[in-house]
Image (spheres, grey):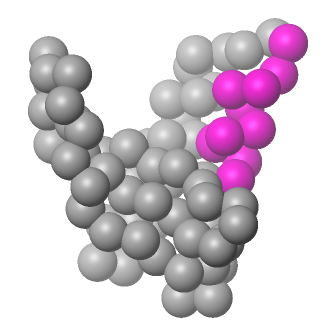
Amino acid sequence: MSVLFAIDTKTEEIIVSDSPKGCNEIKFIERIKREDNEVLYNSVVALTSITKGHNFDVAIFKAMDKVCRMIYNKNK
């Protein structure tokens, strides 16, 4: 399973989805309110901000993505 994270800034929720390797489909899993998992919310915000930088670094992005997955899996 390839977990994907996004932030809904209007509702302050994390959107968690799944995309199997080699597939273009994205399957919605759940929404998590910011107040239900502040640490994960802040981690996904950091992950998102990494993609917006001028000097995008894939290694840093992958490391932060791994942190988000660890936090998500621990709190499932």
Magenta residues? 45-54
Considering the image in quadrants, where does the C terminus appear? bottom left
Q: Position of residue 63 (x, y in %)?
A: 53, 35
Considering the image in quadrants, where does the N terminus appear? top left
Q: Is residue 37 above or below residue 51?
A: below
State left or right for residue 72 relative to residue 65.
left
Residue at 64% x, 73% y: name it.
11
State left or right for residue 36 relative to residue 74.
right
State left or right for residue 65 relative to residue 76.
right
**Residue 52 magenta-highlighted:** yes
View extreme (bottom): residue: 36
Residue 30 visible in the picture: yes
Q: Position of residue 18 (x, y in %)?
A: 24, 46
In front of the other: 37 or 31? 31
Main secondary structure type of the part rendered in magenta? helix
Q: Position of residue 50 (x, y in %)?
A: 72, 32
View extreme (front): residue: 10
Q: Position of residue 31 (x, y in %)?
A: 41, 71
Residue at 58% x, 16% y: name it.
58
**Residue 4 magenta-highlighted:** no
Residue at 62% x, 67% y: name it.
41
Residue at 21% x, 22% y: name it.
24
